[in-house]
Amino acid sequence: MNEYEKRKEAIRRYNTGEKITFIVKSLKKTRQWFYNWLARYKERVDDESWYIGYSTAPREKPTKVKKSVENQVIQIRQKLEDQHFAQTGAIAIQYDWSLTLSRLVKITTN
């Protein structure tokens, strides 16, 4: 029996009047699991999809690097690769980035 079938079976048995204790023991699930799916069943919109879980992943990834920053890092790395004997690692990119930012600050403050 797959997970979807267990969810449907638990609610079906609950609707017939079986005790929750017996339902969760026979399905080897917790009471919390049962009450979670009972709540989903009660707030259902249709009978076809209430037992299908939804993603709990965040809609946005706050630690994801912006595309503009990613492109700047790629440009710096390519510039460093074109230089003979230049290092192209993270520290070299960070150093070059800081030089670029300091130049921008000087231009905007003058």
Image (cartoon, grey):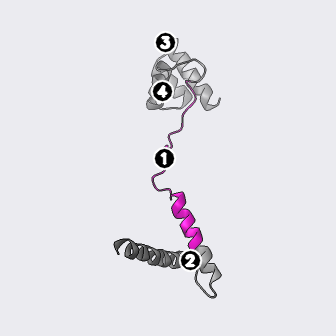
Q: What is the distance, in whole Å, between disc 4 and disc 1 at their CAs? A: 29 Å
Q: What residue is pinned by disc 3?
A: 17
Query: How packed is label 3: few (under 14 Cα within 10 Å), some, or many (20 or more)?
Result: few
Secondary structure at badge 1 equals: loop
30 is higher (above) or lower (below) than 95: above
* For the residues bearing labels 4 and 3, Cβ distance under 8 angstroms: no
Q: What residue is pinned by disc 1?
A: 60
Question: Looking at the image, is mark 3 or mark 1 earlier in the sequence?
Answer: 3
Q: What is the distance, in whole Å, between disc 3 and disc 2 at their CAs? A: 66 Å
* For the residues bearing labels 3 and 2, Cβ distance under 8 angstroms: no
Q: Position of residue 28 (x, y in %)?
A: 54, 32
- Residue at 60% across / 31% down in the picture? 3
Name the residue type under label 4.
Answer: Phe
Question: Looking at the image, is mark 4 or mark 3 earlier in the sequence?
Answer: 3
* For the residues bearing labels 3 and 1, Cβ distance under 8 angstroms: no
- Residue at 58% across / 22% down in the picture? 8
Name the residue type under label 1.
Answer: Glu
Q: Which mark is residue 89?
A: 2
29 is higher (above) or lower (below) than 39: below
Query: How packed is label 4: few (under 14 Cα within 10 Å), some, or many (20 or more)?
Result: many
Question: Looking at the image, is mark 3 or mark 2 earlier in the sequence?
Answer: 3
* For the residues bearing labels 2 and 1, Cβ distance under 8 angstroms: no
Stretch in magenta: 50-76
41 is higher (above) or lower (below) than 98: above
35 is higher (above) or lower (below) than 90: above
**Viewed as shown, does residue 51 lie left or right of 99?**
right
